[in-house]
Image (cartoon, rainbow, N blue to C red):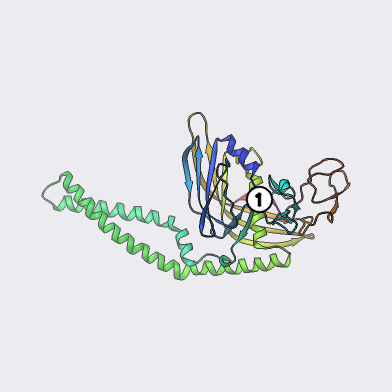
Amino acid sequence: MISDKVHEQRLLQKNAVIVTDYYDQGTTKIRSSDHTRVDDVGSGVILAKKYYMGGKLIHQETEFNPGMLYSFIFPKLEDGRVQCPNCGGIGEDALFSDGCPYCGAFYNMDYQSELLGGRNQSDYVLAEKKSLLLPLILIMAVCIAVGIFLTVTTGRTSTVFDYGKGALIGGIIGCVLYLIYSAWKYKADLTTKEMKKKHEQDIVLQRFLKDLKENGLTMGTFANNLNLGLRDYYFGSESSETRNIIDFDVLDYRGQNLTSQDGKVYITTDVSIRLVSAENSGEKEKVWSDEAVKRIRMRKSDRAGTGQKGGLNIVKCPYCGASIDLTARRCSYCGTAFLYERPLNIERVADL
């Protein structure tokens, strides 16, 4: 099984454990960050994440991108060795016990082809459900206030019962008016704004897929390397921005663009991401989540390898210059661990 030591160290600092439910080939699989449950996941989507601190369930997330497929089993070759689907690195099972020794991948991600082209119109409307909260509050407040005012001013008494009756009548009228308003807004968004948004995203994504293919990349490679790069970004430092973050999830991509400059290939995309943070100061244990949009720039590696075979991948060690086999864990001359590059590497993460 492949684990993520970098992520585990952050969770250990916060005394936190993440239990993740996956849906894989008709059954629910469970993996926990403390290794008490490590079901094999061949190709599954995430159903839920539960965050525990000190053995107590503190927080839970249930909304994830259904296009993401996770695999914690590295595929085996004919000779019994395993191969990293991310960079193509090949080696024995023991070599991959802590993740791929070449690119650092501890799992593999792919993107479901049937979902390419964006979500359907109703998904976009549901994504904007927060915009219906304010109208609900305003409609209910006005209707309840009017109901109480009319009941008290037109009645012969002014008791608590009269106030309650006015609030009930106003609340019922407010619910009816809100249902009419939300139905109208749903229909309007479904037929105009949201359909236009979906069409625009279809065009962007189809162009992006074409550009990826022309450069020897896939949507799965893009999604996988983006996730791995974000893992290093958030768990690889103790800055004020990252030190409390214990988990993240990519929720959506927007505006993917592939360009070439000075012989290099770059990908820029706006990523909607959920960041889960935790605090365990003293007896206080708290877990919360925030959503943010980041503009991320990635660069295609010139040294990323594919289809590697033992004994046929002689390259120069980047540290001592000796000729070594790429499938070796360390340079046989200087002893330095040899980390092969991922196909795509994050160069910049910026706030929007």
Report the side of 16 relative to 151 (left or right).
right
Type of amino acid at the residue the image marks with label 1: Leu
Circle 1 sits in a helix, a strand or a loop, which is it?
Answer: helix
- Horizontal and vertical percent position of residue 4: 64, 44
The residue pinned by badge 1 equals: 228
Furthest-top residue in view?
282
Q: Residue at x 54, y 40 (%)?
A: 17
- Horizontal and vertical percent position of residue 301: 76, 55
Q: Give 147 or 72, whichever is nearer the viewer.
A: 72
The answer, for residue 230, to whether it is visible in the render is yes
- Horizontal and vertical percent position of residue 303: 79, 55
The answer, for residue 296, to whether it is visible in the render is no
Q: Give 211 or 219, whichever is nearer the viewer.
A: 219
Q: Residue at x 67, y 69 (%)?
A: 210
Furthest-right residue in view?
322
Residue 277, by quadrant, is top right
In the image, is residue 99 above or below residue 115?
Answer: above
Q: Give 74 or 149, whichever is nearer the viewer.
A: 74
Report the side of 53 relative to 324 (left or right).
left
Furthest-left residue in view?
156
Report the side of 166 relative to 14 (left or right).
left
Q: Residue at x 59, y 63 (%)?
A: 112
Q: How many marks?
A: 1
Residue 190, by quadrant, is bottom left
Q: Give 345 or 112, whichever is nearer the viewer.
A: 112
Report the side of 40 relative to 77 (left or right).
left
- Horizontal and vertical percent position of residue 245: 57, 41
User: Callout 1 environment at 10 Å: few (<14), some (14 to 19), or many (20+)?
Assistant: many
In the image, is residue 31 above or below residue 114?
Answer: above
Q: Residue at x 46, y 40 (%)?
A: 57
